Amino acid sequence: MSRARLYDDWDFMMQAAYNPDGTMKEAYKEELKADPMFNDKEIIALEARRVAEVKAFDEQEKMFEEKYGVGYTEYCQQAKTRQKYLSTKQDRIKKLHQDIANGEELSSLGEWVDPSDYYDGFSGELDL
């Protein structure tokens, strides 16, 4: 599959109705034609809208690849990982503050704790 369309959870159901390039599958077209709510113009408009979405997504992927070295989808995944790491780091800093306030032994806090942070009062920055 080309990078033309990486399906996300929100449009998983549309995989059955559309090709990766955004064109409508014939079976789905026939299903819509049988439905009195849709006329040929509306079906063409639906397909054109989907093709435009795919084209815009491809352009966004390409722009992210050029700018960041990874596609948009991968960039978003990395951002989620970075956010998770940052929140985990903040939790560890809070725990370290609490442990120092509780008088925990320096040796029980971990090798990455600088003794000067322990004895002088923790400043909040860690090299984790």
Image (cartoon, rainbow, N blue to C red):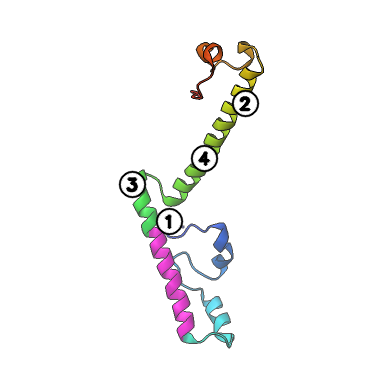
| Residue for badge 2 | 95
Q: Crowding near pointer 3: few (<14 within 10 Å), some, many (20+)?
A: few
Residue kind at label 3, given as amino acid type: Lys
Q: Amino acid at mark 2?
A: Lys
| Residue 104 % position (x, y) | 65, 15
Q: Nearer the viewer, residue 82 or 23?
A: 82
From the image, state whether disc 2 or disc 1 is nearer to you.
2
Distance between the alpha carbons at the discs numbered 4 and 3: 20 Å
Q: Which mark is residue 38?
A: none
Q: Secondary structure at mark 4?
A: helix
Residue 77 in percent (x, y) is at 50, 46
Mark identifier at residue 83: 4
Disc nearer the start of the sequence (1/4): 1
Instruction: Nearest to the eye among marks 4 and 2: give it.
Output: 2
Residue beneath label 1, please?
3
Query: Which of the marked residues, 4 or 2, is nearer the chain's N terminus?
Result: 4
Quarter where residue 60 is shown? bottom left
Instruction: Name the element at disc 3.
Output: helix
Q: Which mark is residue 67?
A: 3
